[in-house]
Amino acid sequence: MQKFFKFLIKHNAYLLLLLYCSIALLLIRFEQDDMLSKIRSAGTELRASIDEKISSYGYLFNLRRENERLLKINAEMLSRILRSETALRNQKARRALLADSTFDTSGYIIARVIDRKFSSRENMLLIDAGTTHGIRKDMTVLTPHGLVGRVVFVSEHYASVLPLIHSDFKVSVMSDRSNALGILSWNGGAEHLAQIDHIPISSPLKKGELMLTTDFSTFSPSGIPVGRIVRIKPDKLFYDITIRLAVDFSTLTYVLVAPAKKNPEKIEMLESVLPQDKPAIINPVN
């Protein structure tokens, strides 16, 4: 035992060095293990972050492509819905046109209003029927409610209609109760109101009377309603009359086209009898 202690005392410096070296090696080993762990952990986190970014970009790309596909499907569905709703509205309007059992539509041509020129003075309608459907110039256009206008131009598949609400449109009318005769015209403004001229104040005309077309017209059959009197005011020689039109032009969808009224002999006689320098109020459409 004495020898062991003598050995420790004699070589204590070397032994302490060896101890310190061992402790240092252990510390270095522990430090290296911790560093490697940190490196592995950081690498794992980096790889996970990269994978997450790649996945998110891929998801966004797929999401964008999916959104484009859904938008296309929605557009197609919306187009089908709009076509279906339009077809239903047209079918409903067509049925409503033919629903009036008191109005015989046989011999009439059914047409749809497909365009309209809006103006404060010069409205115009376009219908989807032309010469191939039997439409001719000067045919009367109407609904079961009343007069719409007359055909002024015809192509193969379409026709232009001069409506009542046009400053150039005029037609001979009469009261269904008092038989008072006058000329209907439209002076612009509200499209549901029109004026009647040339009815003498001696006529027993009253508010509320229904005005109809007469046989004086060179294009329109007689007896077609045009509207009811809503205002009547005596002037010097004639009444100042306002009527509410029978046809609502703001909702006009389908119309009927009556067969052409041709009477060239009557037109020729009117033109030869009336003076050339005076307006032919008896033939107001020309």
Image (tube, rainbow, N blue to C red):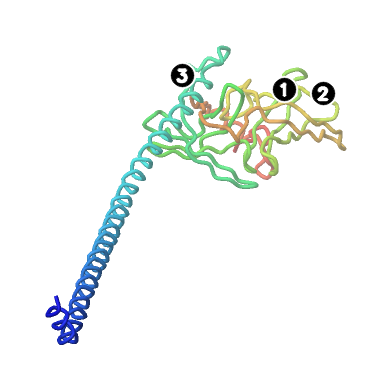
According to the picture, the residue beneath numbered tag 2 turns out to be: 206
For badge 1, the amino acid type reads: Leu
SS class, disc 1:
strand
Task: Tell me the residue at 66%/27% (across/down).
Answer: 246
Q: Residue at x 69, y 33 (%)?
A: 184
Q: Do the residues under discs 2 and 1 have CB atoms within 8 angstroms?
A: no
Question: Badge 2: how crowded within 10 Å, few (<14), some, or many (20+)?
Answer: some
Query: In the image shown, does 54 or 75 lie closer to the viewer?
Result: 54
Instruction: Give the residue pinned by disc 1.
Output: 210
| N-terminal label among 2 and 3 | 3
Q: Position of residue 103 (x, y in %)?
A: 56, 15
At label 3, which amino acid type do we have? Answer: Gly
Q: Secondary structure under badge 3?
A: loop
Which quadrant of the structure image shows residue 273? top right
Q: Which numbered dot is residue 92?
A: none
In space, the residues marked 2 and 3 are separated at their CA atoms by 35 Å
Q: Position of residue 42 (x, y in %)?
A: 27, 66
Q: Is residue 214 or residue 42 the one in the foreground?
A: 42
Secondary structure of residue under mark 2: loop
Q: Residues within 10 Å of mark 3 (few under 14, many from 20)?
A: few
- The x, y position of residue 138, in whole percent, is 51, 33
Residue 61 falls in image quadrant: bottom left
Q: Earlier in the sequence, mark 3 or mark 1?
A: 3
| Residue behind mark 3 | 107
Task: Locate residue 29, reporting x and y percent.
Answer: 19, 72
Identity of the residue drawn at 53% across and 16% down: 99
The Cα atoms of the two marked residues, 3 and 1, are separated by 25 Å
